[in-house]
Image (spheres, rainbow, N blue to C red):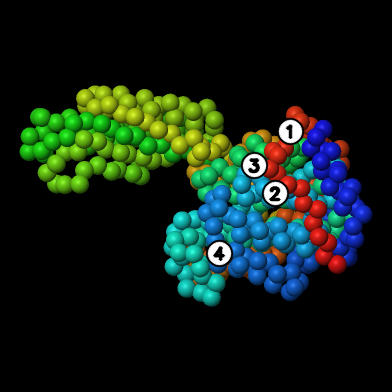
Amino acid sequence: MAFLKWVLLIFTLHSFMPTPISSNLSLNKEALPQIPLNFLEFSKKPEIMDWMVNIRRKIHENRELGYEEFETSKLIRAELDLMGIPYKYPIAATGVVGYIGTGKPPFVALRADMDALAMEELVEWEHKSKVPGKMHACGHDAHVAMLLGAAKMLQHNQNDLQGTVVLIFQPAEEGGGGAKIMLDEGALDNVDAIFALHVTARVPIGMVASRPGPISAAMGFFEAVINGKGGHAAIPQHTVDPILAASNVIVSLQHLVSREADPLDSQVVSIAKFQGGGAFNVIPDSVTIGGTFRAFSKESFLQLRQRIEEVISKQASVQRCNATVIFDERSMYPVNSNNKELHEHFRKVAGEILGFENIIEMQPQMGGEDFAFFSESIPGLFFFLGMKETEGAVHSGHSPYFRVNEDVFPYGAALHASLATTYLLQNPTKHTSPPEHQHHGHMRLHLSKIAL
């Protein structure tokens, strides 16, 4: 297949170059129980820890929005070059895909998202954003730093890997559907499984949270323009009031969950936008409303979408208005569901690093995550990495006061490296063969410089 030939070419050429100095880690089945602890010990070394912190702070100061992560991508590629890790770039505009190991099956992937949010940082510290109106308020800068930390450890042990680790540095998680674009452009061709983590201030440091099956909901956004006939508010009989129509629409939409959905099948429809009129005594010509809908199954999600459009159109018609409903297709994320076998694998690895008493089996959450595109395509596992400190205020993701506890970096890097390494050891013959993928002509192959 074209993809396998391409990857093997990289590794064949790469094998003639000097290899990095190997660490003392032993990556074989006999040492399987000790591998996670060895990686944790390695990632706690001051030079590794300081290096990850420095990378994160550079990214934090110069944050970039989805599909604009050019400097972040440049920094990642520079670090991969120094480590001697071959990679493919660009994928999905700014994405990078690196390869460590044999260049042969099995293939296992590790993913980190790269994009920031369009908001002003209100945390006063030395490395505050230098870019007005942009902030890493969801920890993606930390995700990149930890995946690079894992890459450094894996590359030091590349000759012992029983397959290939694929590093996925993904753009545009925050509503841009970057995972879908990377998938369409072949980033996961021939990959058998994929893992990803997300930092959270809701779980104490030294603990992780995940679950088998659905972990986050399918989600989508919609907007509706309800058109009537404006006029003076003192003579409403000469108008067709879109505000009244929109109000009835909003109330009726709430019945979709309370009266049409199975109470045991969690769903949400929320209206968070209502724009119409600018004066106290003028009924406007139109009103715009918008919101989000969520569900934990594809069937329920599609049913909600259909009914949202029907209710808006027909309720507007009852009030003599007409409505146009627009669904933002790029924001439509499927259910993010964890593979049961991979979850058991995660439990074993996390238990070795953190202790089994520090693994939380969480409830599904209604938030969306575009890792769902990956886990819908191949077996995937998504988990939350706790970073809550014992003291101080807790600010969740997407808050202008969000902080990252950098003490969590060794845990994240060690979990990444351990999950991939032990997966390859335990699945030597596991390999899928998707249809041959034609790589885009603008993508470039990079045989990295070797760090001596």
Q: Nearer the viewer, residue 398 or 296?
A: 398
Q: Nearer the viewer, residue 352 or 409?
A: 409
Position of 98 with respect to 276 (left or right) is right
Query: What is the crowding at mark 3: few (fewer than 14 residues within 10 Å), some, or many (at least 20)?
Result: many
Marks 4 and 1: in contact by CB < 8 Å?
no
Please state which amino acid type lies under the numbered disc 3: Met
Query: What is the crowding at mark 2: few (fewer than 14 residues within 10 Å), some, or many (at least 20)?
Result: some
Pair 3/2: label in front: 2
Q: Answer with the quarter of the image where residue 52 lies.
A: bottom right
Position above or below: 6 against 36: above
Please state which amino acid type lies under the numbered disc 2: Tyr
Q: Position of residue 367 (x, y in %)?
A: 50, 46
Earlier along the polypeptide chain: callout 3 or callout 2? 2
As helix, strand or loop, the secondary structure at mark 3 comes to helix
The residue shown at (55%, 64%) is 62
Please state which amino acid type lies under the numbered disc 1: His
Q: What residue sits right under mark 1 in the picture?
A: 437
Q: CA distance from mark 3 to mark 2?
A: 11 Å
Q: CA distance from mark 1 to mark 4?
A: 34 Å
Query: What is the crowding at mark 4: few (fewer than 14 residues within 10 Å), some, or many (at least 20)?
Result: many
